Amino acid sequence: MRKSHPLRRAVLATAATVSGIVLLLSLKPASDPGSAEAAGGAPPAAESVQGGARPIGDGTVTGDAAQTQYGAVQVRLTVSGGKITKAEAVQAPKGGQSDQVTSNAVPKLNQAAVQAQSADIDAVSGATYTSAGYQESLQSALDKARAAAPAGPGGGGAAQARTVTGDVAQTQYGPVQVRITVSGGKITKAEAVQAPKGGQSDQVTSNAVPKLNQAAVQAQSADIDAVSGATYTSAGYQESLQSALDKAGG
């Protein structure tokens, strides 16, 4: 029987102790709370970037006219609470067979736009070109509405008052041009910076313009009634008002 040497036992004991210390040191980083936190810090940063699509601004906005093989198509949207509440075609192919196609397709496209809340709508059977033009103008209107919306909850852009002047509308009795002040997404003031003048026009203008200004603020759109006895001035006012609304993004 071989007798164990004391020196050999001491060497083995020292080696075992060193191995144990090395093992403990190698395990420590994995259980370090700081390391775990660093490894898990990336996902919250990525999550904060996600915010979904930019909302659409409230009001009325008209898309660009889309030219089709059978005529122009142009869509106007009414937005409330960030949702499309009304869609209408202010231009659509007309004349001959187009009248029947338009009268059948446009109401369906209007309804589809409100239901889909986007331009991702199906074409109406038998109205392929009209449907394509409608979608193109609808997308343009949505893009304008999004561009006018505040960039974020804390942006405060919609609360800042701004003044927008519509294009000049030529009438039989002279030009009409409307300027609106918008604050918080609403028309707070409307005024005619140009209106027919001279002779009988002075009386018509002084009677009609204040009523049209008031109607624009009340309606919050260009869908206002003409003033009796001022048909041309009223039509020009509505045209310039709609132009101002389009520039304001609704």
Image: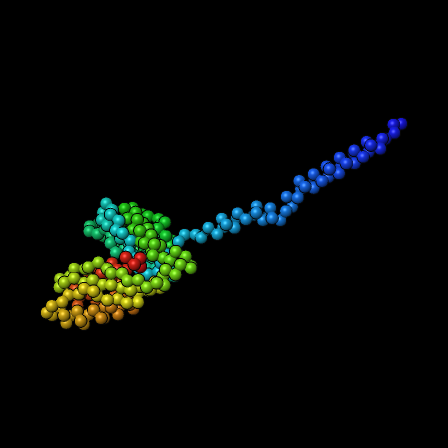
Residue displayed at 41% across by 57% down: 152
Rendered position, 198 above or below 70:
below
Residue displayed at 29% across by 68% down: 218
Residue, far top: 1
Q: Nearer the viewer, residue 198 or 236?
A: 198
Rendered position, 80 above or below 68:
below
Residue, far front: 7
The image shows residue 225 at horizontal and vertical percentages of 23, 67
Residue displayed at 10% across by 69% down: 199
Q: Is residue 66 visible?
A: yes
Count numbered badges in the picture.
0
Query: What sort of colour scheme is used for the picture?
Result: rainbow
Q: Looking at the rendering, which quadrant does residue 19 occupy?
A: top right
Quarter of the image with the N terminus is top right
Rendered position, 67 above or below 80:
above
Left-right relation of 135 to 7:
left
Rendered position, 7 above or below 158:
above
Residue displayed at 21% across by 66% down: 192
Residue, far left: 199
The image shows residue 46 at horizontal and vertical percentages of 49, 48
The image shows residue 213 at horizontal and vertical percentages of 24, 68
Q: Nearer the viewer, residue 67 or 52?
A: 52
The image shows residue 28 at horizontal and vertical percentages of 66, 44
Left-right relation of 2 to 122:
right
Quarter of the image with the C terminus is bottom left
Q: Is residue 238 visible?
A: no
Left-right relation of 144 to 231:
right
Q: Nearer the viewer, residue 1 or 108?
A: 1
Q: Nearer the viewer, residue 46 or 55?
A: 46
